[in-house]
Amino acid sequence: MNVFKEACCSVLGVLLALFLQGSCVDPETEVVHKAVGDSLELIAEYPKKDLEAQWKYHESDFAVYQNNDFRIAKPELFSGRLKLYKDNISVTVTNLKLQDSGSFSIVALAVNNTHITQYTTKRIELHVHDLIREVNIQYDYSWLQSQNICLFHLRCAASDDPGTFYSWSGHQIGTQGSDLNITLGPEEKNTVTCTARNNVSIKSTTEDVVCTRKSDGSSFPQKYVLMAVGAGVVAVVVLCGALAACCRWRNKRGPSESEAGITVYEDVNVSPAKKRSESVINGMSIYETVDDTKLSQNLPQTLYDKINYQRHPAVSTSTSSPYQEVL
């Protein structure tokens, strides 16, 4: 129903535009449509005898034919795009541009020695259009939860030419205008075609639209869930790699000092039943020289004992002092 209303409004709009365009143009004016890059030929179709003619663009003379001579009156107007032909008394505007659109006229008269004859002025209304080379369909849609349908808004674009007309076709579609609204049920598909035309070209394009339920925003977006899962996997891999590297480094380093055996301090407190030299794995420690290496209690126990070891037990008449032995 909505499509039908839009079609009716579009058709009425086009008819109204054509009516207004036709009403604004003089019935004797020739309407000419050209594409950008085309040429416009303006022929003075009058008797050549005693003919004088002026070619005008918006009432400004740009070419003059007089006394069998052709000349350009305003060279800057079409910037070197004018060609004059004396054989058929015509002027051609080449390489037309959009801004060339407008009113052209040819004013002619016959002048002799006796009288002047005024000919009917020839008027041309020129419309220059871009060629339609590409047509694009853009669309978006919204999910109407209450009605369980998708509402599509489509827009067709071809060129900036205001004289371009658009029409749509497809399953149960037939409407005019650049915009189109349609509704589809869940998972329903429709193929739409947009045709763009102006007075010099026509081109079409096709697009498939499918109704898919959209999330209402209450659930966490799936892309963020996937990103979180990926980050968790990376974290686990990095942690496992760090643990493996730590274990490998520990194995290469070997056992610690406490694991390899007793320390030098532990050797001091070894059980009295064993000699310290027997408790030390790598050999004698500094403490062994104090205890284990002495041969008997009669040998010197300290440095001072060694120095005075041969002294007499008592002072005799031959020695006046125990320290004389040392000297």
Image (spheres, rainbow, N blue to C red):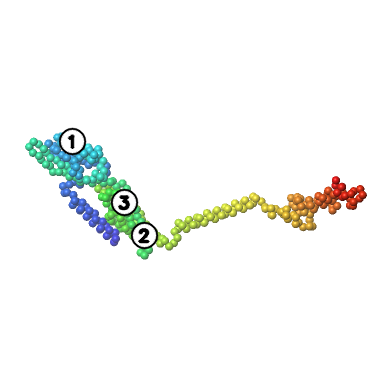
Q: Residue furthest front?
A: 320
Q: Closer to us: mark 2 or mark 1? A: 1
Could you tell me how far apart the alpha carbons at marks 3 and 2 are, in whole angstroms? 21 Å
Is residue 14 in view from this perspective? yes
For badge 1, the amino acid type reads Phe
Q: To which residue does mark 3 refer?
A: 157
The residue positioned 14% from the left and 38% from the top of the image is 52
| Label 3 packing within 10 angstroms: few (<14), some (14-19), many (20+) | some
The residue lying at 91 percent from left, 48 percent from top is 318
Instruction: Name the residue nearer the viewer: 192 or 90.
Output: 90
Looking at the image, residue 76 sits to the left or right of residue 187; the answer is: left
Q: Quadrant of residue 1?
A: bottom left
**In the displayed image of the protein, which residue is found farthest to the left?**
114
Question: Whole-percent x and y of residue 75?
Answer: 22, 38
Who is closer to the viewer here, 199 or 188?
A: 199
Farthest bottom residue? 146
Residue at image location 73% in from the left, 53% down from the top: 264
Mark 1–mark 3 distance (CA, rounded to whole Å) = 45 Å
User: What is the CA distance from the residue labelled 2 to the residue labelled 1?
Assistant: 66 Å
Mark 2 crowdedness (10 Å alpha carbons): few <14, some 14-19, many ≥20: some
**Which percent across, then down, holds residue 42?**
19, 41
Q: Is residue 129 above or below residue 2?
A: above
Please provide percent x and percent y for residue 12. 23, 56
Q: What residue does disc 2 label?
A: 142
Is residue 91 among the parts visible in the rendering? no
User: Looking at numbered disc 2 in the image, what kind of residue is underneath it?
Assistant: Ser
Q: Amino acid at mark 3?
A: Ala
Q: Nearer the viewer, mark 1 or mark 3?
A: 1
Q: Which mark is residue 100?
A: none
Q: Which mark is residue 70?
A: 1
Residue at horizontal 31%, vertical 51%? 157
